[in-house]
Amino acid sequence: MTDAPPAERYRSIRQASEALCTPLSAEDCALQSMEFASPAKWHLAHTSWFFETFLLEDQLPGYPHYHPQFRVLFNSYYQTVGEQHPRPARGLLSRPSLEEVLDYRRHVDGHMQELLQGGALQAPERAASVVEVGLQHEQQHQELLLMDIKHLFSLNPLRPVYLAGPRPADDPSPGRPQWHAYEAGLRSLGHSGDGFAFDNERPRHETLLRAFELASRPVNNHEFLAFLRDDGYKRPELWLADGWSTVCHRGWNAPLYWELVDGKWFHFTLSGLREVRPAEPVCHVSYYEADAFARWTGAQLPTEMEWERAAEDLPVQGNFVEDGVLHPLDAAGAAAGTGRPVQMFGDVWEWTASPYAPYPGFRPLHGSLGEYNGKFMCNQRVLRGGSCVSPASHLRPSYRNFFYPDQRWQFSGFRLARHAEEGS
């Protein structure tokens, strides 16, 4: 969050979305690589649809729609708004063209600036909250756009480079993680204060935590390679039943984007194919893989409440999309020797042991926006902390991300936790 005027903040975030598409061709922007991904063009249009549907239609009597069919084409999952184009078929929308989608954005932006700069908001407090939800929503789609482009490019035999980044320096010694202890007790967790938070971060509530220890950093590639070499993907005793079924059905033998070339592991990145570097956090693993690794070590994943307890007093600092690296970095650049965990924000989203469920007293947003989070609180797992493709201003200690346990195209990693009886 920043103190910039609403019109300026709106302009900055909207421009950031379009800037992410600068390295892409029109063909890149039109393709969809799997059901859960979307074309870049669709992301640009849907985020405009959001402002049009939830603000302009309500705030500007007689608002001139750019195209009446866009209401269906770019509706994601809002059943109370109306019909949606089938999600798996978004990549079949060769029309509207990328140029027309960008024109649609200019149309929406012009009317939004009129609204924000002219002080013409009706019910200003409520409208301002919807504007903020829309901006936070757009930042989520900026991350999704990069996730989806990476997945799309990974399927192309030409190994396209989205953005040529500098080659990292030689790896430092990975080193063993330290353990940070936290006392048992009753803690107030969840979002507090007047700043923005999604409805799923509220209300702040008391939670009884047992004493626990949290690893000082996420699990890195060096450690995960040891799991591979110990036949971690071939030992059913390490896996949840659903996880083992997924491994067998999909033929997993390493994290997503990893491939063995002449005896060395490489992984596909937004800067092309690169050798796996030992000290970098392992990335693009599912909840099942994170849980199996934790079981292999004799530790476990932290609950989301344990994670938030460790992060609540830490500044939101790390490797984010603004840094332009677009890949997790090793822990050497993080603050060390502070007696606190490092890389809690940025680099990789961290799987927790917690199912995505409502907090006690949860209340969804008013109206159709109530579909934003609450209806997904089933069969998914919570991730915390943000990633190397997250906007820094979008994150906070109480932020709850969520994905299905078998999904791994998000920039997801994990760190370990343990409790007193587990020993050291």
Image (tube, rainbow, N blue to C red):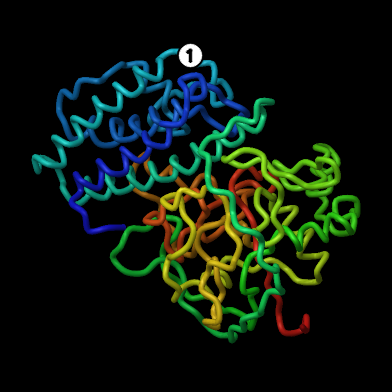
Q: Residue furthest top?
A: 95
Q: Is residue 269 left or right of residue 55?
A: right
Question: Would you call the spot at circle 1 few (<14 residues within 10 Å), some (14-19), or many (20 or more)?
Answer: few
Rendered position, 132 above or below 78: below
The N terminus sits in image quarter: bottom left
Number of numbered tags placed on the structure image: 1
Image position, residue 284 (x, y; %): 66, 48
Q: Which residue is mark 1?
A: 94
Image position, residue 392 (x, y; %): 41, 56
Image position, residue 128 (x, y; %): 22, 48
Image position, residue 308 (x, y; %): 52, 70
Residue at image location 44% in from the left, 41% down from the top:
142
Q: Is residue 240 left or right of residue 97?
A: right
Q: Nearer the viewer, residue 184 or 364?
A: 184
Residue at image location 41% in from the left, 31% down from the top:
22
Residue at image location 85% in from the left, 59% down from the top:
238
Residue at image location 25% in from the left, 27% down from the top:
106
Q: Is residue 113 left or right of residue 232?
A: left
Q: Nearer the viewer, residue 355 or 144?
A: 144
Image quadrant assignment for residue 348: bottom right
Which element carries disc 1, helix, strand or loop? loop
Question: Identity of the amino acid at label 1?
Answer: Ser
Rendered position, 179 above or below 48: below
